[in-house]
Amino acid sequence: MGEVIAFPAPQSPGSPAAPEPLWREAVGHELRAERQESGRTLTDVAAAAGVSMQYLSEVERGRKEPSSEILGAVAGALGLRLVDLTARVTRTIGRVSGPVCLAA
């Protein structure tokens, strides 16, 4: 058999290696922050979105990878458009990981 070669992840010059956050974790963080900021409970938002409270809890904790339909329903139950949620997640991930340069 051949040798397995690990390729290093691209890094910005001078920055320490930090793992990029997972999309599902960033989505969950933003959904939970919005829900808590609006003073709503998991039960309330889950019922409005048509999902179980347990499932919404797992989405908020970054344990589940929800479909776009579920994300749309939960975002809508929180008064957000899916594009607004996506923009928030993009900003969150951008702050944590910084720009990625793939060109040499």
Image (tube, rainbow, N blue to C red):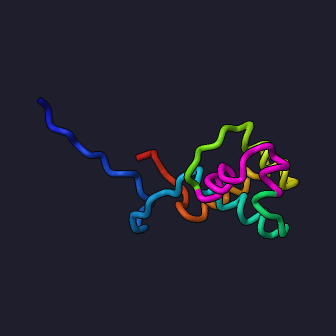
Res 93 seen here: no
Seen from the viewer's position, the closer of residues 103 and 48 is: 48
x and y percent of residue 83 in the render? 78, 46
Residue sitting at x 55%, y 52%: 63
73 left or right of 26?
Answer: right
x and y percent of residue 56 in the render? 69, 52
Res 61 seen here: yes
x and y percent of residue 44 in the render? 83, 57
Residue at the far top: name it. 1
Count the labels in the image.
Answer: 0
**26 vs 83: above or below:** below
**9 vs 34: above or below:** above
Seen from the viewer's position, the closer of residues 83 and 9 is: 83
**2 vs 63: above or below:** above
Q: In which quarter of the image is the N terminus?
A: top left
Residue sitting at x 40%, y 52%: 10
Seen from the viewer's position, the closer of residues 29 and 57 is: 57
x and y percent of residue 15 in the render? 43, 67
21 left or right of 34?
Answer: left
Residue sitting at x 32%, y 51%: 8
**40 vs 84: above or below:** below
Residue sitting at x 45%, y 45%: 103
Residue at the far left: name it. 1
Magenta portion: prevailing SS class: helix
Rendered image quadrant of residue 89: bottom right
Q: Is residue 68 magenta?
A: no
Rendered image quadrant of residue 82: top right
Q: Does the magenta stretch include residue 46?
A: yes
The residues colored magenta run: 44-61
